[in-house]
Amino acid sequence: MVNSNVIRGAGLIILAGTYVALERSFSNNVVGDGKAMYVKLVGSGRGSMYNTCSADSKTLQKLTSVDLAAKPTTSDLEYNFYSIHNPQEYLGGGDATVIEQGPYKLRKHSVMYGVSQSSSALTDAADPDPKGSLEYSTANAYLVLDQDIKTTSNLKRNEDLSLDFSADKITLAETKRALASHLSMKDRVVNVSPDYLSFLGAMNDEVNMILSLVCTSEQIANIGVAGKAQCTDNQLGDVSANCACCMVNVDYEMAKSRNTGLVPAFTNCNSYFDEEGPVLPLLSLLAAHDGGVVVKSAGEKKYDGSGEDFVSTPLGQTEIHTALVQSHTVNDLMFGYPSAYLGRVAFLAQKEQAQQASLPSVTSTELATRMLTGQMDSDLSFKLGNIADYTSKVGLVCFAICTSGAGCSGYAPERRESSDADKIKLGGIDCKPYTSTFETVAKCAAIDAALQLNPNASGYENCVCANGSDEWSSQGCCLSGGIENGNKLSGE
């Protein structure tokens, strides 16, 4: 899955969504009495003050105080969301019916930290004060005002004015619910996904993105080029194979008619856009996990231009979902959410870019590991971040609600139910995107069983977790290796 801190913008998940705070998260949390505040550090947001006093001055001590009980809150924030209530009509070219939802309220506490002093740039003095300028970063703690809550803080200020946490707690005044009675953090909002649009921008368009899941850029460019043979199954996606990805439908049908009805030795490009083909069913399923809206139901005409009715996909879906317009809870939109679609598709569509930036000696598993841990981001059009680490953390809060055959339907425990930093960050998220990762547990178990019987079994290769763990046998993980009955599982 992908991280929204990376997107500024699932076996994989991407933390996709809108963060209330900026940049990176502090690695700890403010907890107490079973309640918690999520602390975010504005890593790139450096402020400055001039003509400051000594490091032990009362002004500086007050500025960096971590006594949240004594400090006034920075502000109470209100967020409104716009939800499309007729997504199918909108995607079909009609006008959108948009409803405003909110306001959803948060309370923000701010603490200055990481203080450094230097000469002021705002002076003409020949010998400027070496401590005339004060630079600092800001940590923001947010409370969701959806219920009455008692909170304590264990923030500690070190002598060097950095932040830390201690065993001592400061009790804050009880916070009262400020959310209107008809509003909830689990209210759902339907709107265009900015993260999916960001990914499409990196891939140029949706057609190129879909073909990139199967073919290299050269193989796509060879479509319609005279003399270029059709790629074999083994050549598809191989950067060394100079062949054609497929044949456009017009040429395919013409070649078929000239050959007295016999199909040409090419794959019809339309098959990649067929609801019963090799690609679209997977994209639809991943979009469904992410809350993508329905764009087609059984009985409607297929996308491949054949005029036939759509019945169901090979994966058993009787509806086709899109990742363009998605439904998410207010909680997820505010604090981030996992994406099965981007985690899998962004990995597969950019493998060629990663291959071209790597040495030929790098194995496919090693390459996948580097991609899924963020080590190849500088070479990719769409940054992935450390998908492997994020997927593992999502598993900590979502695995318990997953069941075989039904996937992961439900929500992670609320933030107030934990004092674990990673679980607090993912509190209350919709766990459905984790379904694709959860399902790899059974696949990896089947692989392990087959190799136990025959270590040389054809079409089977042990699962490898990109984060170096053995979670494939327990909660599931982001896979960088594994083959089940000839099907490669890397990226799941």
Image (cartoon, rainbow, N blue to C red):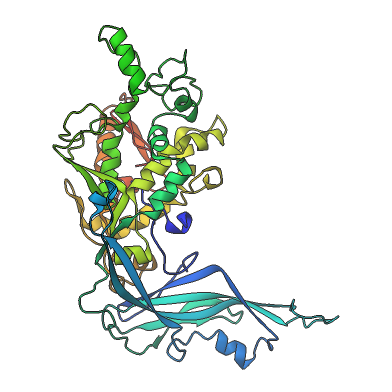
Report the side of 314 relative to 272 (left or right): left
Report the side of 321 relative to 467 (left or right): left
Q: Where is residue 130 in the image (x, y as percent from the top left)?
A: 76, 80
Q: In this view, does 431 lie above or below 136?
A: above
Quarter of the image where the C terminus is located: top left
Residue at 51% in and 37% down: 353
* Residue nearest the viewer, comparing 164 with 226: 226
Q: Where is residue 109 in the image (x, y as percent from the top left)?
A: 44, 81
Q: Position of residue 38 (x, y in %)?
A: 39, 73
Residue 264 in view (yes/no): no
Q: Position of residue 24 (x, y in %)?
A: 49, 64
In the rendered image, the residue lying farthest to the right is 126
Report the side of 143 relative to 58 (left or right): left
Residue 261 in view (yes/no): yes
Q: Is residue 272 above or below residue 444?
A: above
Q: How many marks?
A: 0
* Residue nearest the viewer, comparing 326 with 308: 308
* Residue nearest the viewer, comparing 421 with 201: 201
Say which quarter of the image contains residue 414: bottom left
Residue at 43% in and 23% down: 223
Report the side of 288 relative to 6 (left or right): left
Say which quarter of the image contains residue 329: bottom left
Q: Is residue 350 above or below residue 123?
A: above
